[in-house]
Image: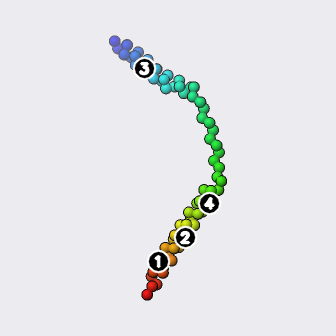
Amino acid sequence: MAVSRVSFGVVAVAILVFAIALPAVQAQSLAPSPAPTSDGTSIDQGIAYVLMLLALVLTYLIHTMDGSYSF
C-alpha cells in the first residue's frame, strides 16, 4: 500500500515536470529587439518643459513682487 502511494507520487511529479519542460523545447526563440534610437524629440520636449517651468517661476516672482509694492 505504501509503495503504491510513493510510486504514484513519483509518477505524478515526473508527469508534472515533463508537462512543464517539454513545451519549452518547441518554443520559438525571441526576436532581437531593435536598438534604441533617439531622434531628438524627447530632448526637445525636455527643453520645452524646463523653459515652461522657468516662465512659470518668473511669472510667479514678478507678480508677487508687483503686489508687495502697491500702495
* Sooner in the amino-acid sequence: mark 4 or mark 2: 4
Residue beneath label 1, please? 64
Is residue 33 rendered to the left or right of residue 7? right
Residue beneath label 2, please? 55
Q: Position of residue 35 (x, y in %)?
A: 65, 45
Residue beneath label 3, please? 12
Residue beneath label 4, please? 44
**The C terminus lies in quadrant:** bottom left
- Residue lying at 49% horizontally and 26% vertically, measured from the top left: 20
**Residue at the outermost left position:** 1
Q: Secondary structure at mark 1?
A: helix
- Indicate the quadrant where residue 16 lies: top left
Q: Is residue 44 above or below residue 28?
A: below
* Sooner in the amino-acid sequence: mark 4 or mark 3: 3
Total tally of numbered discs in the picture: 4
**The N terminus lies in quadrant:** top left
